[in-house]
Image (cartoon, grey):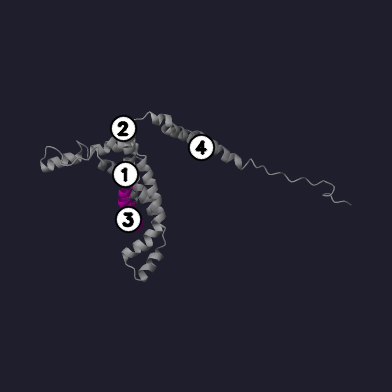
Amino acid sequence: MIPESAQGGAKPARKRSFLKPVLPWLGISIFMGLFFFYPLARILWLGLNPAALNTLDLASLLLAFHSLLFTFYQAALSTLLTLILGLPAAFLFARYTFHGKSLLRALTAIPFMLPTVVVAAGFNALPGPRGWVYLGLMDLFHLQAAPISIVGTLGMILLAHVFYNTTIVTRLVGDALSHLDPRLEQAARTLGADQPQVLYRVTLPMLRPSILASSVLVLICDFTSFGVILLLG
């Protein structure tokens, strides 16, 4: 007898369709191309078109260059100040237990969700020209005008950016710090390292990825923060 397989009775293996794994990525690519990359390319073309650049005079180019430098400067300075305030807060929430910790941690996330107009109104109501801080200083020292004024200055921009973005550093670095192995720091202390040496030689190197990630996010937020500068700067 001839085996059934030799007689051609076996069913041929079904060919695997290569379109099934490609279709989801194809849809995502089309969506990103139409609604992200195409508008971005149009913006770059309209902004960097040589025909449009030739119509600009020297004063306009200098103004654009100054605005670009100021954007980089305020974003870098705001990021540095945010790290200075956010890193101690991250250590506080990750390493210490106190009453009201959960509530305070939740409150730190509120500024990041507030609209720019609300933040601008709040800052004008506190350190603004007729704000509580200025009126309190005038009443305290019997002055006709406030001794300091930060409205419309770089200081107001930095203060608003720190108010907005400190929670990014607190959350990212704090979560990374809470998941570190405490035995590494204990081993360093056993070998004779004091608290500053443990911090700079053990803890901070392990936190470097989270610090860099939070710094990049804060820098991007500060660099693209047009509403804060328009309303408060």
Q: Whole-Å distance between the Cαs marked 2 and 1?
A: 21 Å
Residue indicated by mark 3: 92
- Residue 32: image tag: 4
Instruction: Give the image location of residue 142, x and y in percent.
Output: 10, 41
Residue 71, position in %: x, y?
33, 41
28 lies left or right of 66: right
SS type, badge 2: helix
Q: Secondary structure at mark 1?
A: helix
Span of residues in magenta: 74-101
**Which amino acid lies under the numbered mark 1 shown in the image of this protein?**
Tyr
Q: Which residue is labeled 1 in the image?
A: 73
**Separation of marks 4 and 3 at Cα, in angstroms:** 41 Å
The residue mark sitting in front, 2 or 1, is 2
Sequence-first disc among 2 and 1: 2
Indicate whether 153 appears above or below 98: above
Residue 102 in the image: above or below residue 68: below
Say which residue appears at 35% left-offset and 68% top-offset.
189
Depth check, mark 1 against mark 3: the one in front is 1
Q: Residue at x 41, y 29 (%)?
A: 52
Q: In this figure, which residue is indicated by the disc labeled 2?
A: 59
